[in-house]
Image: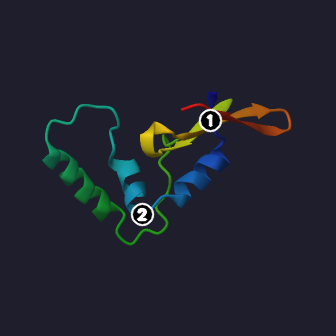
Amino acid sequence: GGVEAADEAAAEACFEERPRGSRITAWISRQGRSLLRRSDLDAAWAKGEARFDGVDPIPRPAAWRAYRLVPESVELWQAAANRLHDRLLFHRVAEGWRVERLWP
């Protein structure tokens, strides 16, 4: 399926559900950038923790966004002996979801 940006209200609600530590990480993270030393991450964490000491709730950073996956199909399976796995494929249809059992 596709991915779409969630609106500001959904992003705010998603951020509010995150644990306190994850909110601090959202403020200190330079996601995807190179990190030379673990000690740099630990120092940034300590600085972020100090910054938000006594702040509740921690606000959402302006750049923090939420995205929504809109699946067309989803496959779930449960492992079984001899690889006789139970596999279910869910397809989106107008009235909801159609379920199909698959061979292992």
Q: In the rendered view, does 27 fall on the left or right side of 88?
A: left
Number of numbered discs overlaid on the protein picture: 2
Image quadrant assignment for residue 20: bottom left
The percent coordinates of residue 65 (x first, y second) are 53, 41
- Return the residue at label 2: 20
Please say whether residue 71 is visible from this viewpoint: no
Near mark 1 (Cα within 10 A), the count class, few <14, some 14-19 or many ≥20, is few
Image quadrant assignment for residue 75: top right
In the image shown, does 51 or 12 lie closer to the viewer?
12
In the image shown, does 37 or 102 lie closer to the viewer?
102
Query: Does residue 14 lie above or below 103 as drawn?
Result: below
Identified by mark 1, the residue type is: Val
Query: Does residue 26 lie above or below 95 as drawn?
Result: below
Q: Residue at x 59, y 31 (%)?
A: 103
Q: In the rendered view, does 23 fall on the left or right side of 84?
A: left
Q: Residue at x 48, y 40 (%)?
A: 63
First in sequence: mark 1 or mark 2?
A: 2
Near mark 2 (Cα within 10 A), the count class, few <14, some 14-19 or many ≥20, is some
The percent coordinates of residue 101 (x first, y second) are 66, 36
Image mark for residue 74: 1
Q: Residue at x 40, y 49 (%)?
A: 26
The percent coordinates of residue 15 (x first, y second) are 53, 53
Q: CA distance from mark 1 to mark 2?
A: 31 Å
Please say whether residue 22 is visible from this viewpoint: yes
The percent coordinates of residue 54 (x first, y second) are 39, 72
- Seen as rendered, the residue at the extreme front is 82
Q: Quadrant for the C terminus, please.
A: top right
Identified by mark 2, the residue type is: Arg
Label 1 element class = strand
Q: In the rendered view, does 22 fall on the left or right side of 96?
A: left
Q: Quadrant for the N terminus, please.
A: top right
